[in-house]
Image (cartoon, rainbow, N blue to C red):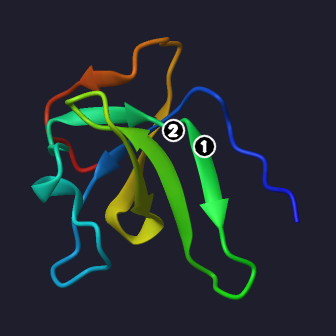
Amino acid sequence: MSIFYEPNLYVRIVELENGPAPLPLANGFNTERAYRVLGLYTASETGEAYLILPNDREEMWFISNRHIRVKGILPETKLHVDYKNETN
């Protein structure tokens, strides 16, 4: 199975209460930044995907897609982009 993702895709964290581990806000992510997607992993048995994201400490984490919302496709090369906490 192959999955394509947009190389300039940035996402924001919206942590689900009682969501799957790891919880991003407890592990170096915050709601005031957009994070560049570095990769994607999905097990063939489940519909859940894990996005590979760099946190604010430059650590790479596999974060469940259930904690993620799309920020946009941005013409950036940075690992994170600050933004005002918006609804989209």
Place of residue 50 in the rendered image (x, y in percent of width and height, measured from the top left): 52, 62
Side of 49 relative to 66 (left or right): right
Q: Which residue is at a point 49% across and 11% down the rendered structure image?
A: 77
Side of 14 relative to 85 (left or right): right
Which class describes the residues within 10 Å of circle 1: few (<14), some (14-19), or many (20+)?
some
User: In the rendered image of this protein, does residue 16 appear above or below residue 70?
Assistant: below
Place of residue 60 in the rendered image (x, y in percent of width and height, measured from the top left): 40, 40
User: In the rendered image of this protein, does residue 15 appear above or below residue 61?
Assistant: below
State which quadrant residue 9 falls in. Answer: top right
> In this figure, which residue is indicated by the disc labeled 1?
39
Mark 2–mark 1 Cα distance, whole angstroms, equals 6 Å
**Looking at this view, is 83 or 29 the one in front?**
29
> In this figure, which residue is indicated by the disc labeled 2?
37
User: In the rendered image of this protein, does residue 39 appear above or below residue 24?
Assistant: above
Q: Which residue is at a point 88% across and 66% down the rendered structure image?
A: 1
- Judged from the image, the secondary structure of the residue bearing numbered disc 1 is strand
Q: Which mark is residue 16?
A: none
- Judged from the image, the secondary structure of the residue bearing numbered disc 2 is loop
- Dot 1 amino acid type: Gly
Residues at discs 2 and 1 in contact (Cβ within 8 Å): yes
- Dot 2 amino acid type: Val
Place of residue 53 in the rendered image (x, y in percent of width and height, measured from the top left): 42, 42
Which class describes the residues within 10 Å of circle 2: few (<14), some (14-19), or many (20+)?
some
Q: Which residue is at a point 48% across and 13% down the rendered structure image?
A: 76
State which quadrant residue 45 falls in. Answer: bottom right
Q: Which residue is at a point 17% across and 52% down the rendered structure image?
A: 27
State which quadrant residue 10 falls in. Answer: top left
